[in-house]
Image (cartoon, rainbow, N blue to C red):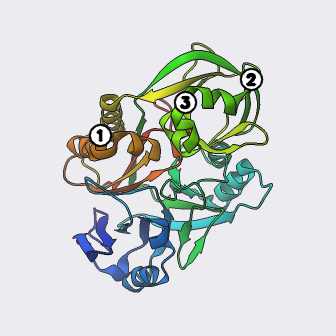
């Protein structure tokens, strides 16, 4: 099962034009313990593709999700399926999932997932979640509440190519929607790095959230939130909720508090409300944000630097990149620059793979508190120590 010191990573990529390409050769596919797979909704739903993955890795646990774009090395792709197959030398893997039924509390779902993964040697939890119906911040808090302080949580919310209709989760031989998968990694040799940064600029007046409930925003300064957003977006308003990705909301508990960013996932015309990927607490200060091209790329580079510094100078075996779809929409033809900046920092050794998401889960910069982020590049690195 691999060498005595290193985890082994195989990386493969499927497109209609090329079929399967092996971009990095791993060890014996029969030894693979975990496959992480990210793809277009149509690829995740394709029975033939999933059967091909299972045939190659018959003994592996499989976890994946649909995306708003796949990250493969320093390339950003659409309509493809990207995977890494991991063979650990000293780490074991467990997968659990919970379905999200109407009315379910996302925080409770997170607690149940954490409880199911409990173990003395739990080293890390990676979460892949539905991207549209979950309250990502409540989910993250729920998972973290029932974990030891030594265990960090990273991951992301699935996408559906920017359609905002239906995201998919893939676990072993089943495809699900309205679900959350949690991957537990166990062992004292696992080395996990993390980093998450944005690169957006706030603009316009600083308003107060005067009415909200969970991740639903009803009023800003006493006025309907949806109408205020429409006034600011102008011609972009006709394309809501998708165009809202270009103008996320900057939230602060107070004028000097640390900000968090929230992205619109949906709108409710009847209520005049906006539905965000995570909580938008009543009483918080809120300000619209817009993109700065160079700062977005710098943010990705900063996330990579933080991930590397969190574990020392050794180049990791794997870097999982989860970036927000809003960044992809803004960067357009320059989108690969943010991935290239990560490679420049992390070096040639790690296999790079990931996806564009509807929300990113990672520790807050400078702390061990894990939160849902929006509009960030979030990086999780994995390696095993000797």
Residues packed near mark 1 inside 10 Å, few (<14), some (14 to 19) or many (20 plus): few
Q: Nearer the viewer, mark 2 or mark 1?
A: 2
Query: At 44% from the left edge and 65% from the top edge, which residue is drawn?
Result: 40
Looking at the rendered image, the quarter that the N terminus falls into is: bottom left
Disc ID at residue 223: 2
| Marks 1/3: CA–CA distance | 47 Å
Q: Earlier in the sequence, mark 2 or mark 3?
A: 2
Identify the residue shown where x is 40% and y is 83%: 52
- Which callout, 1 or 3, points to the residue nearer the camera? 3
Query: In this orientation, does residue 149 appear?
Result: no
- Callout 1 touching callout 3 (CB < 8 Å): no
Q: Of the residues tagged 2 and 3, which is closer to the observer?
A: 3
The numbered mark at residue 274 is none
In the image, 109: left or right of 59? Answer: right
Task: Name the residue beneath numbered marker 1.
Answer: 312
Q: Dot 2 surroundings within 10 Å: few (below 14), some, or many (20 or more)? A: some
Nearer the N terminus, badge 1 or badge 3?
A: 3
Could you tell me residue 28's position as x and y percent?
A: 29, 80
Disc 3 target residue = 234
């Amino acid at each position: 099962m691999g060498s005595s010191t290193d985890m082994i990573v195989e990386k493969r990529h499927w497109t209609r034009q090329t079929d399967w390409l092996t971009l990095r050769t791993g060890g014996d596919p029969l030894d693979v313990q975990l496959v992480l797979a990210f793809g277009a909704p149509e690829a995740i739903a394709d029975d033939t593709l999933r059967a091909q993955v299972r045939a190659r890795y018959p003994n592996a646990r499989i976890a994946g999700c649909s995306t708003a774009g796949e990250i493969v090395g320093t390339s950003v792709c659409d309509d493809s399926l990207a995977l890494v197959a991991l063979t650990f030398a000293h780490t074991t893997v467990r997968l659990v999932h919970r379905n999200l039924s109407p009315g379910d509390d996302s925080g409770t779902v997170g607690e149940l997932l954490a409880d199911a993964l409990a173990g003395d040697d739990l080293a890390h939890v990676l979460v892949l979640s539905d991207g549209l119906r979950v309250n990502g911040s409540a989910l993250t808090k729920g998972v973290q509440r029932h974990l030891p302080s030594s265990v960090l949580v990273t991951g992301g919310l699935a996408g559906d190519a920017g359609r905002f209709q239906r995201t998919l989760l893939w676990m072993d031989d089943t495809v699900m929607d309205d679900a959350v998968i949690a991957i537990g990694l166990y062992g004292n040799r696992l080395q996990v790095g993390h980093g998450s940064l944005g690169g957006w600029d706030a603009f316009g007046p600083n308003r107060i959230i005067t009415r909200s409930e969970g991740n639903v925003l009803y009023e800003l300064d006493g006025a309907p939130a949806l109408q205020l957003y429409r006034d600011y977006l102008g011609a972009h308003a006709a394309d809501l909720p998708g165009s809202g990705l270009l103008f996320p909301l900057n939230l602060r508990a107070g004028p000097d508090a640390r900000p968090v960013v929230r992205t619109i996932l949906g709108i409710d015309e009847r209520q005049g409300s906006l539905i965000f990927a995570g909580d938008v607490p009543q009483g918080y200060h809120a300000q619209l944000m817009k993109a700065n091209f160079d700062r977005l790329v710098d943010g990705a580079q900063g996330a990579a630097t933080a991930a590397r510094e969190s574990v020392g100078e050794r180049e990791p075996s794997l870097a999982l990149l989860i970036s927000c779809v809003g960044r992809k929409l803004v960067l357009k033809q320059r989108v690969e620059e943010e991935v290239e900046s990560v490679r420049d920092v992390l070096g040639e050794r790690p296999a790079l793979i990931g996806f564009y998401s509807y929300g990113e889960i990672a520790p807050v910069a400078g702390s061990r508190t894990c939160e849902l982020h929006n509009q960030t590049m979030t990086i999780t690195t994995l390696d095993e120590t000797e």
